[in-house]
Amino acid sequence: MTHTLHRKGDKEGLSNDYIVFAISAQTVNAKGSAPKFKEFGDIVLKYNPVNYGDMKTGNAYNVGVDKVHESYKDNSIVHAVFTEEDIVAKVLKELREADLGLSIVLSGIVEHTSECCHKISIEPHTIEYSLGIHGKTDSLPEDNVVEISTMCGHGMVSFSLIEHFCEEIEKGRITADEVARKLAKQCHCGVFNPTRAAEILRLMTDM
């Protein structure tokens, strides 16, 4: 199970949203794994992810990449967000060659993530699917708000904050790109995609 699994959106919107993250097995190989996370970071950061973070430290937008990259722990979970399938395939290729001994998780549309694996001749160990949101869905805000909020798997980007910032954009007080960066700060782990968020915000506000 991963907190990056339940991102809401249509196929087009999710086609530019990929998360690659590394985790150790807490009771198996976590002890002494901090240097391995640094190696993971050295690889993925070469490909300029649009967000990067460690659940133990923060992300590129609230503490900065340098702080994340100097603070890995044995129980870190380190995330990088990308927008292009070809780049993700290159990242996976390097990670496979590095053989870090960490579990590598890739989230995205399953056909696209499978194609990334196919390009470098690897088979996924496990595939998980999100079945969407069930229950009293008429209590949810509009779909675009949910699409932005669910980019933070721990629910740290609230519906009301998104709606507030949409009003501010419409009044000309702030841009969609600025709002996307502010929202990214709220998602501690660094799995929020500010590039996709800005696109959705522009659609919502006609700006």
Image (tube, rainbow, N blue to C red):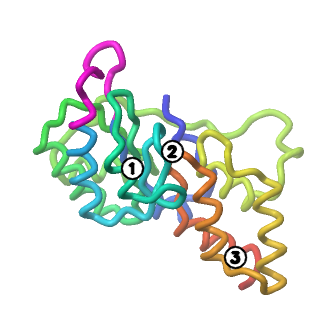
Q: Nearer the viewer, mark 2 or mark 1?
A: 1
Count of numbered labels shown in the rendering:
3
Give the overall secondary structure of the magenta segment.
loop
Question: From the viewer's perspective, is 41 left or right of 153?
Answer: left
Residue found 28% across the figure and 63% down from its top: 87
Q: Which mark is residue 68?
A: 1
Q: Which residue is mark 2?
A: 189
Label ID, residue 25:
none
Residue 141 screen position, x and y as percent: 83, 54
The front one of 173 and 83 is 173
Above or below residue 173? Residue 48 is: above
Q: Amino acid at mark 1?
A: Val
Would you say 135 lies left or right of 124 here?
right
Occupied quadrant, residue 198: bottom right
Q: Secondary structure at mark 2?
A: loop
Residue 27 falls within the magenta-colored stretch: yes
| Image position, residue 187 (x, y; %) | 59, 50
- Depicted 92 relative to depicted 77: above or below: below
**At x 51% / y 45%, what residue is drawn?**
189
Answer few, some or many: residues within 10 Å of disc 3's Cα (few below 14, many 20 plus, some between 14 and 19). Answer: few
Which residues, given as a range, are shown in magenta? 23-35
* Mark-to-mark CA distance, 2 and 1: 10 Å
Residue 13 position within the rendered picture, expressed as x and y whole percent measured from the top left: 56, 64
The residue drawn where x is 62% and y is 68% is: 180
Question: Which quadrant does the C terminus fall into?
Answer: bottom right
The verdict on residue 152 being magenta is no
Real-space Cα separation, disc 3 to disc 2, in angstroms: 26 Å
Q: Amino acid at mark 2?
A: Cys
Q: Amino acid at mark 3?
A: Leu
